[in-house]
Image (cartoon, helix red, strand yellow):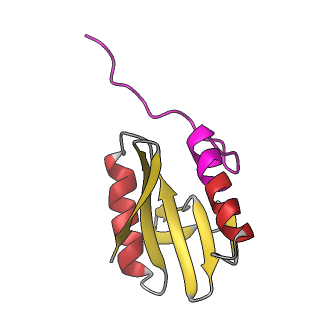
Amino acid sequence: PDAPKRKAAHTRGQMNGLEADYAQRLEALRRAGEIVSWQFEVVTLRLAPDTTLTPDFLIVTSTGVEFHEVKGGHAWEDSWVKFKIAAALFPWARWFWCQKVDGQWVGTERK
């Protein structure tokens, strides 16, 4: 039988192609004045003693802080669970799960 597929290794601080595409979108929003600023993997949040989450993007808007997690066509279950826990533990920020659908970015807010 085939071995289970493993998640590709991620090098902290380096964007993959999808994240780089999303960063271009954020930069266009910043230049248009729709957001104040954005940063990639700048914050690591402790969710439990041995569990952390480093959201892909921290966005500063005129009304507060947002975290955006960018995922491809398949989302790893552990990423989704961590995302939901983080949104519950840090309600002072807005949380968006972002995917590209039919060539357009769609951000679903987790409340």
Q: Is residue 49 left or right of residue 60?
A: left
- Residue drawn at the location 56% of the way across and 35% of the way down: 9
Give the percent coordinates (x, y) of residue 25. 62, 56
Occupied quadrant, residue 57: bottom right
Depth check: give the residue in front, 61 or 58.
61
Dominant secondary-structure state across the stretch colored magenta: loop
- In the picture shown, does residue 85 fall above or below 3? below
- In the picture shown, does residue 44 fall above or below 56? below
The magenta segment: 1-23
Q: Is residue 73 left or right of residue 23?
A: left
Depth check: give the residue in front, 86 or 35.
35
Occupied quadrant, residue 39: bottom right
Residue furthest to the front in view is: 32
- In the picture shown, does residue 109 fall above or below 1? below
Q: Quadrant of the N terminus?
A: top left
Q: How many marks?
A: 0
- In the picture shown, does residue 15 fall above or below 47? above
